[in-house]
C-alpha cells in the first residue's frame, strides 16, 4: 500500500482537492432546495466509499477482468431493462433504480462493462482481411447499440454520448484500413446532413421517424443559443457577478435550480469565486496528464485501450460541463467528475480509476 501512495501521490492529492471543493459547495446546496438538505453528508459518504474502493482495487487481481467481461456486460443490460420498468421517474426520466433505499443509475455502470467487453473483443480478434475488419466493426456497433437504445428510452442522452466515445476509442485502437475511417466520416456527414434537411424542411416526416419525445430533445439542443434557459441565464450572471474569492460558506449569490449537479462550475464560482475555477481546472489538467502518462507506460494493448476509454470520457465531461456552464454548448445532463452531486457517478469514477491504477502497475 505504501508503494501505491508513493506512485500515485499526485493523483490522490488532486482528487482530495476536488473532493474538498465539492463538499464545500454541497454545504451551500441546502440553500438551493430542501432536496439538497443532506447533500453534504451524502457526498461525504460517497467520497469516503470512493477512496476505500480506490484502495481496495489495489488488493484485487484484475488481470482476468476482461475474460469475464461478457457476463458483466449482460448483467448491466439486464439492469438497463429493469430500470425501464422499475425505475424511479425523476423529471420525466427513468434512469434510477431504488436498491435498499439508495438510488442507483445503471447507465453509469454500463460505461465500465461496455468498455471492458469492447476492449476484450477488439484485442482478441485477428484482423487479416477486409472482411474481418467489417465483421469486427459491425459487432462493436451492435454491442454498443443495445445499451444505447435502452438508455435512449429512459431517456439519457449523456449516457449515449459516453457509449459512442467508448466505441470510437476502441475502433481507433484497431488501426483499421484508412478507408474505414473515411467511410465512417462520410456516413456521419451524410447522416447529419439528412437530419438537418428533415429538421428544417420536413419536420412532420422527422417526427414520424424518430418520435415526438426525441424530436423535442433535439429541438432544444439545436435552438439552445436562440433563447437561454433560466438556469443558464442565472449561471452566467453568477459567473459575471462573482469576486475572486466568492461569498463563502452558507450563502448563495443567485438561485440556480440544478446548481449542485449540472451547473456545479457556475455554482462554485458564485460561492468561492474565480479562485475555485482556477483550482478546479488546474486539478483536472494535472489528473488528466497523470493518467495519460500512467497509461502510456503500460505495454499491454488491452489495458491501454481500456484506460483511454475512461480518459476520453473523463476529459469530455470536463470540457462539455464547463462549456455548458459558460453558455458555449447546449445544456445536457453531463456531470462534472468528482464534483457534481451524485453517488453513482462518483463511485463509478473511483472504480474506473482503481482498476486503471491496478492494471497499470
Image (spheres, rainbow, N blue to C red):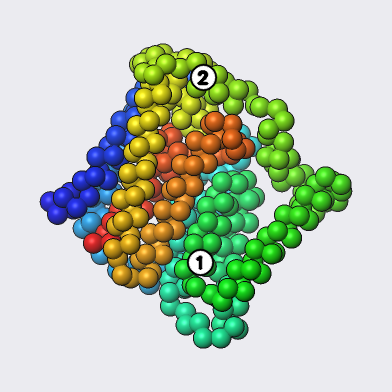
Residue in the foreground of this view, choosing between 263 and 325: 325
Q: Is residue 198 above or below residue 251?
A: below
Q: Dot 1: within a 10 Å radius of its alpha carbon, few (fewer than 14), some, or many (20 or more) residues? A: few
Q: CA distance from mark 2 to mark 1?
A: 40 Å
Q: Dot 2: within a 10 Å radius of its alpha carbon, few (fewer than 14), some, or many (20 or more) residues? A: few
Residue in the foreground of this view, choosing between 358 and 201: 201
Closer to the chain start, of discs 2 and 1, is: 1
Residue 336 shown left or right of residue 353 in the figure: right
Q: Quick one: SS at disc 2?
A: helix
- Say if residue 236 shows up in the picture: yes
Residue 79 shown left or right of residue 248 in the figure: right
- Which residue, as the protein is rendered here, is positioned at the far left? 2
Q: Quadrant of residue 297?
A: bottom left
Report x, y in % for residue 288: 36, 48
Which residue is found at the position 59% from the left and 83% from the top? 130
- Say if residue 26 shows up in the picture: no
Give residue 240's mark: 2
Residue in the foreground of this view, choosing between 202 and 210: 202
Q: Quick one: SS at disc 1?
A: helix
Q: Is residue 222 above or below residue 194?
A: above
Residue 208 shown left or right of residue 250 in the figure: right
Which residue is found at the position 39% from the left and 36% from the top? 281
Marks 1 and 2: in contact by CB < 8 Å?
A: no
Q: Quadrant of residue 220?
A: top right
Which residue is found at the position 52% from the left and 56% from the top? 165
Report x, y in % for residue 152: 63, 51
Report x, y in % for residue 310: 42, 54
Give residue 172's mark: 1
Which residue is found at the position 45% from the left and 20% from the top? 270
**Which image quarter is the C terminus in?**
bottom left
Amino acid at each position: 500500500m505504501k508503494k501505491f501512495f508513493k506512485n500515485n501521490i499526485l493523483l490522490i492529492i488532486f482528487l482530495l482537492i476536488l473532493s474538498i471543493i465539492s463538499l464545500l459547495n454541497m454545504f451551500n446546496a441546502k440553500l438551493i432546495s430542501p432536496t439538497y438538505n443532506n447533500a453534504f453528508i451524502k457526498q461525504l459518504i460517497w467520497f469516503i466509499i470512493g477512496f476505500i474502493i480506490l484502495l481496495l482495487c489495489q488488493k484485487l487481481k484484475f488481470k482476468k477482468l476482461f475474460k469475464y467481461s461478457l457476463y458483466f456486460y449482460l448483467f448491466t443490460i439486464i439492469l438497463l431493462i429493469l430500470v425501464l420498468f422499475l425505475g424511479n421517474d425523476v423529471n420525466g426520466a427513468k434512469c434510477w433504480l431504488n436498491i435498499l433505499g439508495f438510488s442507483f443509475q445503471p447507465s453509469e455502470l454500463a460505461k465500465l462493462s461496455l468498455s471492458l467487453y469492447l476492449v476484450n473483443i477488439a484485442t482478441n480478434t485477428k484482423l487479416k482481411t477486409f472482411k474481418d475488419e467489417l465483421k469486427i466493426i459491425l459487432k462493436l456497433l451492435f454491442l454498443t447499440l443495445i445499451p444505447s437504445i435502452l438508455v435512449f428510452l429512459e431517456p439519457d442522452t449523456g449516457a449515449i454520448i459516453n457509449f459512442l466515445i467508448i466505441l470510437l476509442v476502441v475502433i481507433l485502437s484497431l488501426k483499421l484500413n484508412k478507408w474505414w475511417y473515411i467511410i465512417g466520416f462520410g456516413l456521419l456527414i451524410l447522416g447529419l446532413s439528412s437530419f438537418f434537411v428533415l429538421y428544417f424542411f420536413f419536420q412532420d416526416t422527422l417526427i414520424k421517424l424518430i418520435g415526438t419525445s426525441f424530436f423535442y430533445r433535439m429541438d432544444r439542443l439545436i435552438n439552445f443559443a436562440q433563447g437561454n434557459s433560466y438556469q443558464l441565464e442565472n449561471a452566467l450572471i453568477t459567473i459575471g457577478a462573482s469576486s475572486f474569492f466568492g461569498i463563502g460558506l452558507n450563502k448563495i449569490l443567485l438561485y440556480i435550480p440544478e446548481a449542485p449537479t449540472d451547473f456545479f462550475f457556475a455554482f462554485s464560482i458564485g460561492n468561492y469565486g474565480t479562485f475555485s475555477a482556477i483550482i478546479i481546472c488546474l486539478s483536472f489538467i494535472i489528473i488528466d496528464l497523470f493518467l495519460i502518462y500512467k497509461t502510456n507506460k503500460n505495454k499491454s494493448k488491452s489495458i491501454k485501450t481500456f484506460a483511454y476509454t475512461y480518459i476520453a470520457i473523463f476529459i469530455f465531461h470536463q470540457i462539455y460541463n464547463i462549456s455548458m456552464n459558460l453558455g458555449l454548448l447546449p445544456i445536457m445532463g453531463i456531470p462534472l467528475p468528482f464534483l457534481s452531486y451524485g453517488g453513482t457517478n462518483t463511485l463509478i469514477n473511483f472504480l474506473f480509476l482503481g482498476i486503471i491504477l491496478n492494471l497499470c502497475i
